[in-house]
Image: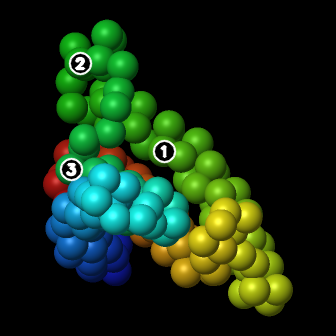
Amino acid sequence: MPRAIRAYVRYVEAFNRGIGRIAMYLVLVMMGILLWSSFSKTFLLPSLWTLEMAQFTLTAYYLLGGAYSLQLGSNVRMDLIYGSWTPRQKAWVDAFSVFALIFYLGVLLYGGFESTSYALQYGERSYSAWRPYMAPIKIIMCFGILLMLLQAIAEFFKDVARIRGAEL
């Protein structure tokens, strides 16, 4: 494989590994928010922000961690037939099926950019009682989708290398 492709895969995977390791701790943040929600509903006045903030944290968790999950091969597959194939056969199938993922993520990213630009331009707010601005979570969503798109392209390059008998 050309040096530029190897460098691309190396840098994208290193970046996604770092972001994914940080994103793992968002579960603890979410647990803290939900613990505070339970405590405040029991002993204090209920907080308006806890449910929506927990949802935003969960969204950031799975979108920022999605590329790392893809990198580790933790995504869900139907192993009924796939599990019995050789690594080269799996690489062939993965190299073709990743185009569906890249197309899906491209369309999702396009829609995310449109929605984020709308939220920034008009100061979009949630319809809840708390009424937070939507732009920060939409920016995080676009960033997570972009990371998954970059990782999907890196997975394609790794599959092509496997087909050629090499590893990246």
| Residue 32 image position (x, y, % from top left) | 23, 63
Which residue type does callout 1 highlight?
Val
Identify the residue shown where x is 21% and y is 24%: 86
Residue neighbourhood size for the residue with mark 3, other residues' Cα within 10 Å, grouped as few (<14), some (14–19), many (≥20): few
Which residue type does callout 3 highlight?
Leu
Q: Which residue is identified by label 2?
A: 83
- Residue 72 is marked as 3
The image quadrant of residue 27 is bottom left
Q: CA distance from mark 2 to mark 1?
A: 18 Å
Quarter of the rendering occupied by the C terminus: bottom left
Name the mark nearer the viewer: 3 or 2. 3
| Residue 4 image position (x, y, % from top left) | 34, 80
| Residue 159 image position (x, y, % from top left) | 33, 47
Q: Which residue is identified by label 1?
A: 98
| Residue 150 image position (x, y, % from top left) | 44, 67
Which residue type does callout 2 highlight?
Gly
Vertical placement of 97 versus 158: above or below?
above
Q: CA distance from mark 3 to mark 2?
A: 16 Å
Name the mark nearer the viewer: 1 or 3. 3
Identify the residue shown where x is 64% and y is 80%: 133
Which secondary structure lies at badge 2? loop
